[in-house]
Image (spheres, grey):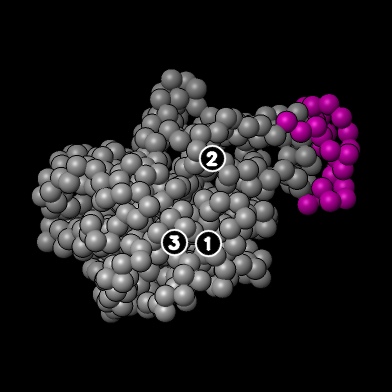
Amino acid sequence: MRARRSRVLRVAAPAAALVLALAACQNGSGDEASGPVPTLTGDCAKYQAYAGHAGKKVTMFASIISPESDSLQKSWAEFSSCTGITISYEGSNDFESQLPVRVQGGNAPDLTPIPQPGLLKQMVQTGKVVKPPQQTVANVEKYWAPSWKTYGSVDGTFYAAPMSSNMKSLVWYSPKAFADAGYTVPTTWADLMTLSAKIASDGKAKPWCGGIGSGTATGWPATDWLEEVVLGQHGGDVYDKWISHQIKFDSPEIRQSMETVAGWMLNPAWVNAGFGDVKTIATTTFQDAGKPILSGKCYMLQQASFYRAQWPAGTTIGPDKAVFAFYLPPVNPAIKTPVVGGGEFVTAFADRPEVQAVQNYLSSAEWASSRVKTAPGWVSANNGVDIALYTDPLDALSAKALSDTSGTFRFDASDLMPAAVGAGQEWKSMTAWFAQGQSIDKVVKDIDAAWPE
């Protein structure tokens, strides 16, 4: 993640809360919400629009867990200390399954960043999602492309502001290992497949490693592989019709893309170095999937920009460092710069003033800029972020691709599909494809059968 995804799931982490006293930069004392709004001074003055809620707590539940959640909490630490609003954060590996349970059980968080528009729609259908305040709406209209507002809408009504964005069309590799072996970064799909065959033939290591394990969200990386191929093989029109089920999984186009994925990531001669055979892709967590690159057991991993947070501490990242990434070229070179991306959308289940203050802040360019500063590897499609803040070459590559208006950008397909499919049967069936060797015929028919009437 999506997280996922982004589905950005990690090892389990306990709930963490920023329990912060009102900072010295805020005048006044006690519960400011019930009295005059205090004047913030010094470094806190920039948070004046959010003042007046000292001592209040806002709960947040999400799929983002350590280590990425650590930098996430740093990104709003100053906001919390200056305003006196405590953001009590909890991340979970079982977010997608637990959120509906909590909402239906009357234990909904105040805010939750949802990485799947399909899950957002499911939550809206409960009748418990609260529409965002007007300032949040204004921020989204100012800083984000119209498509992002659409992704945060259900049946034409806007509910959730985009919080983050990520680029998924990347391949991680070791520049040093490539140089030592005499390999060059491929710029076409044909070159990528030729390189994969050569690496396998050389016999020093497998070309690809992979893992789709992710708790109750197991399977999502495999859906990403299919999405990359569908968009890069057939283009945006087929991709859009596939999302809406006008084109079914059991169609010539999607079957062809399934065959392409099979020749790539289910190829026993090409995967899964460091772990075992093809079936081990289903039991290897996506967090661990890239580690064999560091030990020289495999050369490449297809994963998103957010995978940066999964490399072991101390791993250097750059064009001449331990690891880096290159753009995953399209299967069909005629398709202009296809990019699959994802993101999270801040959804509210409460409309208390302090909750709305946090919503407004998280939809601002100021918060997005703070997040960029605290989390190398995190990029945003928020156009209020100064591109100069992306000092890392990989971040700059991702930000440029996400903001390329001439390219073919599409949001993660499974995140846009109904939750019963995109966050349910598709994960299950794609996992069975890898773990049990289920046929493409069964996989596509089972997924189509799960589509809501």
In contact (CB < 8 Å): disc 2 and disc 3 = no
Residue at x 21% of width, y 47% of height: 433
Disc 1 secondary structure class: loop
Whole-Å distance between the Cαs marked 1 and 3?
34 Å
Residue of label 3: 296
Q: Earlier in the sequence, mark 2 or mark 3?
A: 2
Q: Earlier in the sequence, mark 1 or mark 2?
A: 2
Whole-Å distance between the Cαs marked 2 and 3?
28 Å
Disc 2 secondary structure class: loop
Q: Identity of the amino acid at label 1?
A: Ala
Q: Which residues are magenta?
A: 19-46
Label 3: how many residues lie within 10 Å, few (<14), some (14-19) or many (20+)?
some
Q: Is residue 28 magenta?
A: yes
In contact (CB < 8 Å): disc 1 and disc 3 = no
Any part of residue 440 in sight:
yes
In contact (CB < 8 Å): disc 1 and disc 2 = no
Image location (x, y in percent) of residue 387: 62, 69
Image location (x, y in percent) of residue 157: 42, 46
Whole-Å distance between the Cαs marked 1 and 2?
22 Å
Q: Identity of the amino acid at label 3?
A: Gly
Q: Quadrant of residue 120?
A: top left
- Disc assigned to residue 347: none
Residue of label 1: 381
Any part of residue 417 in sight:
no
Residue of label 2: 65
Determine the main secondary structure of the stretch shown in magenta: loop
Q: Residue furthest top?
A: 105
Residue at x 46% of width, y 70% of height: 177
Q: Identity of the amino acid at label 2?
A: Ile
